[in-house]
Image (cartoon, grey):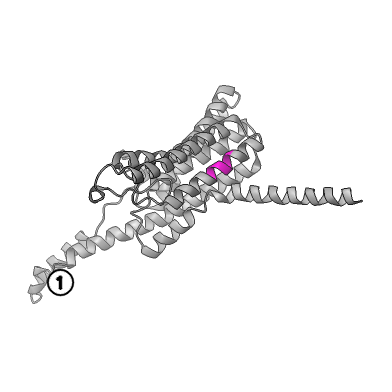
């Protein structure tokens, strides 16, 4: 009787741990973006967040979902990709609206603010001609050139003026990638390559910070707590891949991701112990991954 109760207790504990691990895998990746979203919303300034982070994560997770049609993996990882895609679209929506509003505000200030004085043309307010000239100039000044996805101008790729343009780009990528996957789904080489590209793209998300630290010979301005959170999270994720016998691409790129995190932690130690140049010349950088 006691053995039966003990076995049931162990079973409940195992189920509980399994559920906690699953929830951590599904939602853990989006947690760092919650405070980032709140900061942008509160400050109405998106300059500190690179929307290319959203691009990388969107591509990686779309490819991962398509990979599942050719090679089965845990449902928790599928939900993780769906939630990450949703999160990145929400971030893009916020950043686009904030950036456009900031551009309009800057244009208005550049016309009306002249050291606290009114523009010269307004001093001739008694003349309808001058007033018309001033109004027309103001209307022209606050117009911001708009960039659209359908313009297909690579100079403005991923810096469009409307959220709908990002949606159009993502949908176009999904349709093309899904069509190619459908045609080549029977090819083992294609399926395995697709899975590798999906997780490798995400694994390389921390390399911009690694490279920036190397260029600046410093890690000042970078959140050490955030780096430690990356390392612990990526280590947990890689262990989850191994324990659940996820496809080889997942745990190989997970190990690579942990190695990048450890390299950044090593930079923190090295540059703090052996400063390479005066602090006054340090360029503060923002990590793509931290954002």
**Splitting the image into 4 quarters, where does residue 275 fall?**
top left
Point 48% across, 36% down: residue:
259
Residue at (23, 60) in percent of width and height = 107
Height in image: 72 above or below 87?
A: above
Per the image, label 1 sits on a secondary structure element best described as: loop
Taking the spot 47% from the left edge, 49% from the top edge, the residue there is 88
Magenta stretch bounds: 233-238
Side of 228 where 287 appears, left or right:
left
Question: Outermost residue, right direction?
Answer: 1
Q: Is residue 235 magenta?
A: yes
The x, y position of residue 278, in whole percent, is 24, 47
Is residue 172 in view?
no
Tell how many labels.
1
Quadrant in which residue 182 is drawn: top right
Front-most of residues 157 and 233:
233
Q: Is residue 230 visible?
A: yes
Q: Please name the predominant secondary structure of the magenta segment in the image.
A: helix
Q: Residue at x 56, y 27 (%)?
A: 192
Q: In x, y percent, where is residue 25?
A: 60, 46
**Quick one: label 1, few (<14), some, or many (20+) residues within 10 Å?**
few
Taking depth in this image into account, of 219 and 201 the one nearest to the observer is: 219
* In the depicted structure, whether residue 241 falls above or below residue 100: above
Q: Position of residue 114 (x, y in %)?
A: 14, 67
Q: Which residue is mark 1?
A: 116
On the picture, is 266 further left or further right than 189?
Answer: left
Residue sticking out furthest to the front: 273
Q: Nearer the viewer, residue 260 or 109?
A: 260
Q: Depth check: give the residue in front, 229 or 190.
A: 229
Whether residue 70 appears in magenta in the rendering, the answer is no
User: Where does residue 249 sit, x and y in percent of width and height?
Assistant: 56, 31
């Amino acid at each position: 009787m006691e053995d039966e109760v003990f076995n049931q207790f162990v079973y409940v504990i195992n189920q509980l741990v399994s559920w906690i691990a699953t929830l951590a895998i599904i939602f853990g990746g989006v947690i760092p973006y919650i405070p980032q979203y709140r900061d942008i919303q509160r400050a109405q300034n998106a300059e500190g967040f690179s929307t290319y982070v959203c691009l990388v994560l969107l591509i990686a997770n779309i490819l991962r979902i398509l990979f599942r049609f050719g090679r089965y993996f845990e449902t928790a990882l599928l939900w993780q990709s769906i939630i990450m895609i949703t999160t990145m679209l929400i971030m893009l929506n916020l950043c686009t609206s904030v950036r456009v509003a900031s551009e309009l505000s800057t244009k208005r200030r550049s016309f009306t603010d002249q050291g606290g004085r009114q523009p010269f043309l307004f001093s001739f307010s008694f003349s309808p001609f001058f007033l018309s000239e001033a109004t027309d100039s103001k209307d022209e000044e606050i117009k911001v050139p708009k960039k659209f996805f359908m313009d297909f101008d690579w100079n403005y790729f991923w810096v469009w003026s409307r959220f709908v343009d990002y949606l159009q780009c993502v949908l176009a990528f999904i349709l093309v990638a899904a069509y190619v996957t459908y045609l080549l789904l029977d090819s083992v080489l294609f399926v395995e390559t697709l899975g590798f590209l999906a997780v490798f793209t995400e694994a390389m998300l921390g390399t911009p910070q690694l490279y920036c630290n190397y260029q600046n010979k410093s890690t000042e301005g970078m959140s050490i707590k955030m780096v430690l959170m990356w390392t612990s999270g990526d280590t947990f994720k890689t262990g989850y891949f191994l324990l659940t016998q996820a496809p080889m691409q997942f745990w190989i790129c997970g190990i690579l991701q942990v190695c990048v995190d450890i390299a950044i932690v090593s930079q923190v130690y090295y540059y703090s112990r052996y400063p390479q140049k005066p602090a006054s010349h340090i360029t503060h950088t923002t990590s793509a991954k931290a954002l």
